Image (spheres, rainbow, N blue to C red):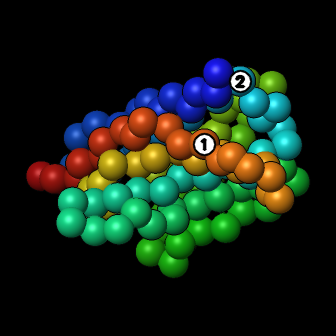
Amino acid sequence: QVQLVESGGGLVQPGGSLRLSCAASGIIFRFYTVGWYRQAPGKQRELVATITKDRNTNYADAVKGRFTISRDNPKNTVYLQMNSLNPEDTATYYCHAVWIGKTPDYWGQGTQVTVSS
């Protein structure tokens, strides 16, 4: 059974930082492209950042220079370090895993990030 379990969300003040973690099980993690998406109320889910099995990264323009994605293959975990948070970053953040060229892909249950003073 495949599971992606996110953690690290919470309430933070503008300008603050959070680090999200996503622990995967049931997949050969090192072969997967993994990433983070987010969905704010009333909006579509959008890509935040991805990292391939070769550690190539891709970021949404809105988070470039503030967020950093990384992976630890022995721990089957992907991280999202989020700095300089602002209220527009408030959303539910979802972990995603896909083996490029194969199906299915997988989603976590989401973790809430709220940026507010």
Query: Image height check: is 100 above or below 22?
Result: below
Q: Residue at the far bottom: name it.
A: 61
- What is the x, y in percent for residue 53? 83, 49
Query: Image height check: is 49 above or below 22?
Result: below
Residue at mark 2 = 26
* Corner quadrant of residue 77: top right
* Corner quadrant of residue 49: bottom right
The one of 27 and 58 positioned closer to us in this rendering: 27
Residue type (three-letter) at the residue carrying disc 2: Gly
Q: Residues within 10 Å of mark 1 (few under 14, many from 20)?
A: some
- What is the x, y in percent for residue 7? 44, 30
| Element at label 1 | strand
Which quadrant is the N terminus positioned in? Answer: top right
Residue at 85 percent of width and 43 percent of height:
31
Would residue 73 be visible to someone looking at this image? no
User: Quick one: label 2 or label 1, which is nearer the N terminus?
Assistant: 2
| Element at label 2 | loop
Residue at mark 1 = 106
- What is the x, y in percent for residue 81? 52, 47
Q: Is residue 103 left or right of residue 42?
A: right
- What is the x, y in percent for residue 104? 69, 46
Residue at 23 percent of width and 40 percent of height:
11
Residue at 74 percent of width and 50 percent of height:
103
Residue at 53 percent of width and 43 percent of height:
107
Q: Is residue 110 left or right of residue 81?
A: left
Circle 2/circle 1 CB separation < 8 Å: no
Q: Residue at the far left: name it.
A: 117
* Corner quadrant of residue 91: bottom left
Would residue 32 be visible to someone looking at this image? yes
Residue type (three-letter) at the residue carrying disc 1: Tyr
Q: Is residue 15 left or right of residue 69?
A: left
